[in-house]
Image: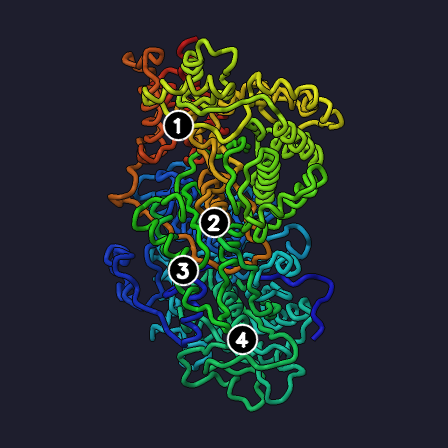
Amino acid sequence: MHINSGRDPIAIVGAACRLPGAQSPADLWQIVSGGRDVIGMIPQERFDIETASGRRRPDVLRGAGGYLDDIAGFDARFFGVTPFEALRMDPQQRLLLEVTWEALDDAGIPAESLAGSDTGVYTSLLPSGYWDLLRRSGMYDMHAALGAAVSGIFPGRVSTQLDLRGPSMGVEAACATSLLAVHVACRALWAGETDLAIVGAANLQIVPDLYFALADAGVLSSSGRCKFGDVSGDGYVRSEGVVALILKPLSRALADGEHPYATILGSAATHDGRTGGSLVAPGLEGHETMLRRAYLDAGVSPCEVDYVEAHGPGTPAGDPTELAALDLVMGEGREPGRRCLVGSLKSNIGHTEFTSGMAGLLKTALALRHRTIPATLHVVEPHAVLRKPTAAVELALLTQDWPEREAPALAGVNSFGMSGTNVHLVLSEAPRPARPRRGRTRPSYVLPLSARDPRALDELAGAYAELLDTMAEGTGAEDTGPGLHDVCFSAGARRSHHEYRLAAVGDDARSLAASLREFRASGRGDGRSVHAGERRAARRPKVVFVFPGQGGQWAGMGRQLLAAEPAFALRLHECARAVAAELGWSPVDVLLRGERLSRVDEVQPTLWAMQVALAAVWREWGVEPDLLIGHSMGEIAAAVTAGALSVADGAAVIARRSRLLRELRAPGAMWAVRLGEEAARQAIGEHSGQVSVGVVNSRHSTVLSGDPARLERIVEPLRRDGVFCRRVDVDYASHAPQVEPVREALLEALSSIRPGPCAVPIHSSARDRVVDGTELGAGYWFDNLRLPVRFADACQAALADARPTVFIEMTPHPVLQTALEEEVEAAGANASVVPCLRRDVPDAAALSAALGQAYVLGCRPLWEHVHPEGEYVRLPGYPWQRRRFWPGSATSPVPPEPAREPTPALPGRPDLAALSETELTAMVADLASQVLAVPGHEIGMDVPLTLLGLDSVLATRFRERVRRELGVDVPVRSLLGPSTLLDLTTELRSAATV
């Protein structure tokens, strides 16, 4: 075998299908490997038989057929297609959209990862007759024309949906169409024109007209079966089918950790010319030429091929010609007694016509993967060419193991069309992956799931629970199923992530399955083992890392993370070495011994190292901060995280300052009180010279700092009045005059530090503004100790814009969570607080739960870093939430009124300036609901209009409705940008007040 060594084979990395009896490639394999015939009868509800046939042979429509179920159903919301447009889309387009997405999922390629790439789209969709139904229903608008009248529109629809920049085209060559599309895609890949190809085909029989033409021509089987290779074969059975394949160069597929079904080594496409005697008659010479060119292109001798998937429709003209050509070419140089086996999928599922080539390709790829050659059915007496003693080919009459050879298994796939076009592909089995390697184990796992509909998320949770149950039952040494590490890795790194999200947390498959079932039972997360929610915003939330002061420490904190999280351990050891250089002891040793910390010069350096290490984990996981806020000593960790201080300088600040605080002789104390800042000042009253409001955590929470005796006198009446008061476990008074004695010593001790610019902004809680990193010298660190902590103001500044915000508290135990939540509630902001660890929860479980919560809130972790060294495994598919779209259906949107000239504004048009914000918002949402044909409750006011399904045609209608009914002219281009309905409402109000 001399495979074409000048180019990379093309790997089939993803596949999906809808075929008679098969909803997936796995279903198809069950059919063919089991030797099953799934042909049924033409569904009587599909056609109005009497009306369609008139007086012409109604029996034709009562025969055999391979039909798909529910071709009217479509998950329009998933693809951002309005019900108005969905009704006007040919079901072939709708089904192929879903199947294409499934193929990408099957390949483990997140759709969003292809945006802007040179990915090509090659499709085979010939007219199904749906356009005729739309016309009869009076739908002649542009959406109907694009959706059903022009089949070449579909590849552009896919390219637009996924933002692809490579070639995008429809291919047509009668029944050779789909395999020709694969041939064209392979050529583009080999030429470097595209780096990945999506190839799809669909064939539905929506109107019966072609049945009569085929029946008149004697092409349909009288027995209701496709009898490829049998002398009694007198025609084929019409069937429906949809197939999508994902192709990419093999070297890239292997580098990306994918497991191809098979590889394509070469191909050829020819035409019979006049060798067949007529346009529709097959030509032996044309077939022979096609085969020779394909094997020459592949660099393979035909005699080395073990199996050919024939076009094989079971027709009296087609079968003998195809078999004769195969016998002639495949026999050259072949060893005596080693015949090439031949079969046809059409004997199982019928002739899917324009999809048949890709259906046969998929069957052959599955056969190569399983190293099994399925039987071809319905053969009693083979054709004469097969009965010759010298025949080089024979029918695969039994399902059998693939012949063992030293070289990889080889196969061919044929596809012909009435147009005279012939296509042949040469396939090889893909490189065999090693036995599944178990990814490294973790003490806790995060399984992220998402959907575009809450019902879909519920069903997806159920599918994963079943998978996890199976895994929990098969954990023996010989188990070769997917490992939990790989499942979590694949669900995160190799799936698209949608707005309805769920994150299950557990230490094994059984606990994760239990969490998913709990979610299904309750419809919500419990905040510990499962988080769930809806991320409505289209963009990533603003992430704020919050570094608290002391108070969150506990014995044993961080020990599990030292062993489980390399990024944490690496950063903590770096901090520990810097602290050891300052103080002579290592925080790592303290944590490993599980010692209780009490002295300030032990607590603060250890907490600082923990905070810096926790921040490093989040950043390693791909959760990058947009802003940092430090609280008292927490600002030192924030400065190191921002890059303003080196680890050595950060250690110097925390170690030298805490040592000076320990040596401070001035008595001091601090009390946390449940009072706002002004009320706290009033409570201090006459003691203001000795007691200060040292910390303002929130509008309801402050910390009083100063002389211990005077503080006792202040808090005593507060306690009597029921005000919460708690003494902070320190023996000094930070953020008060009592620390003035260390000023000069601290400035001298820190004179050598050299701060630099911040890579991430820091909002200083000492100076209540965003600071430049170069300001963070010795003087700043005394101010940080002496000035009040204006944490509430820093939080309010972070919440000032309308962007959804996630505060992540870098702490061994929540210290500021309540204060943060109070400020969020007071601001009415779309924000949440995520604490890293908790005292009563194992470190790894708590941190995993925090990551899961951040994911549900819209963060985009790098899951390949969360679950490193994971291998891609195939996972449960997306559970489509279909709705029926069919002309005349009671559940389909009512067609709009016929287009008419814009009418003048009505005298009763509302005064927008006089409307409340709620009234105007409701009015705009109602207009959008009418134009988009979307129920009002599904209209997201904060979602870009284009994601709701608005396109240029609907945008023009929407603009006209707004102008006519509200009196404001809105540019179409603004509607098609990132604008939301909330933005439009603001624009309308502004226009009304000019």
- Mark 1 or mark 3: name the one nearer the start of the chain: 3
Q: Secondary structure at mark 2?
A: loop
Q: Is residue 748 among the parts visible in the rendering?
A: yes
**Residue 404, image quadrant:** bottom right
Residue at image mark 4: 371
- Mark 2 or mark 3: name the one nearer the start of the chain: 3
The quadrant of the picture occupied by the N terminus is: bottom right
Q: Position of residue 837 (x, y in %)?
A: 49, 42
**Is 463 left, or right, of 266 in this rendering?**
left
Q: Amino acid at mark 4?
A: Arg
Q: Are marks 1 and 3 in contact (CB under 8 Å)?
A: no
* Numbered-mark total: 4
Find the distance from the CA under tag 2 to the CA under tag 1. Answer: 57 Å
Q: Amino acid at mark 2?
A: Pro
Residue at image mark 1: 957
Q: Are marks 2 and 1 in contact (CB under 8 Å)?
A: no
On residue 510, the disc is 3
Q: Residue at x 60, y 45 (%)?
A: 590
Find the distance from the CA under tag 2 to the CA under tag 3. Answer: 18 Å
- Mark 2 or mark 4: name the one nearer the start of the chain: 4
Residue at image mark 2: 842
Find the distance from the CA under tag 3 to the CA under tag 4. Answer: 33 Å
Q: Secondary structure at mark 3?
A: helix
Q: Are marks 2 and 3 in contact (CB under 8 Å)?
A: no
Badge 4: residue crowd in 10 Å (few <14, some 14–19, many ≥20): some
Q: Are marks 3 and 4 in contact (CB under 8 Å)?
A: no
